[in-house]
Amino acid sequence: MPLRTVRPNIVQSIRAFRVQDLQEAATQLGHHFLYANLGNAQSKQDVLDMIAAQYTFPAHFGKNFDALYDCMTDLVHKSGAQPGFIVLLEQIPAHAKFDKEAREQLLDIFRDAADYWADGKLPFRCFDSFL
């Protein structure tokens, strides 16, 4: 079973996992695979724009952290039954325009989403890496 050593509702470093392995695990488990490469982001707005584009959020996405949480939880929940999620945030920027506080706020959104889906007994695993 893929990811058997990874809790079902967690945000953690990608560590030894490869993107392709996570995508294959999502396929095997029948889960949604959401991937965002943020390597070219220079600001909070860039990060939000890139996540919205790569996760194919609706055009009315508010492009702020509250709207990101809403898209990762309520909006998806209202679209019907979900099988589970494997989410990847690759190359989160680490520089003055997207500092440690901004990175923690971003990861907190995904931690809160993991908690939200845990309440419904739905797996939500989020993996991250820093640039």
Image (spheres, rainbow, N blue to C red):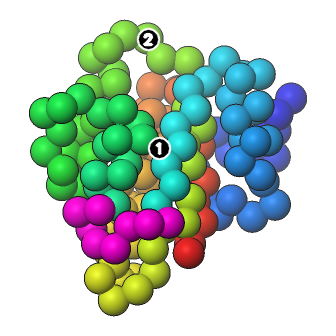
Kindly identify the residue that appears in the image at 71 percent across and 23 percent down: 27
Q: Is residue 24 visible?
A: yes
- 84 falls in the magenta region: no
In the image, which disc is placed on residue 88?
A: none
Q: Is residue 54 above or below residue 130?
A: above
Q: Position of residue 116 (x, y in %)?
A: 39, 38
Q: Which residue is mark 1?
A: 114
Quadrant of res 33:
top right
Looking at the figure, which quarter contains the N terminus? top right
**Magenta segment, prevailing SS (helix, strand or loop):** loop
Q: In whole angstroms, how far apart are the C-alphas of marks 1 and 2? A: 16 Å
Which amino acid, mark 2? Ala
Q: Position of residue 112 (x, y in %)?
A: 38, 50
Which amino acid, mark 1? Ala
Q: Residues within 10 Å of mark 2 (few under 14, many from 20)?
A: few
Q: How many marks?
A: 2
Kindly identify the residue that appears in the image at 18 percent across and 55 percent down: 64
Q: Position of residue 17 (x, y in %)?
A: 78, 54
The segment highlighted magenta reads 39-46
Mark 1 falls on what kind of element? helix
Q: Is residue 15 above or below residue 101?
A: above
- In this view, the residue in front, 74 or 71, is 71
Name the side, left or right, on which 50 lies relative to 16. Answer: left
Q: Which residue is mark 2?
A: 81
Residue at the limit of the structure toward the right, as seen here:
1
Kindly identify the residue that appears in the image at 44 percent across and 54 percent down: 111
Residue at the limit of the structure toward the front, as seen here:
40
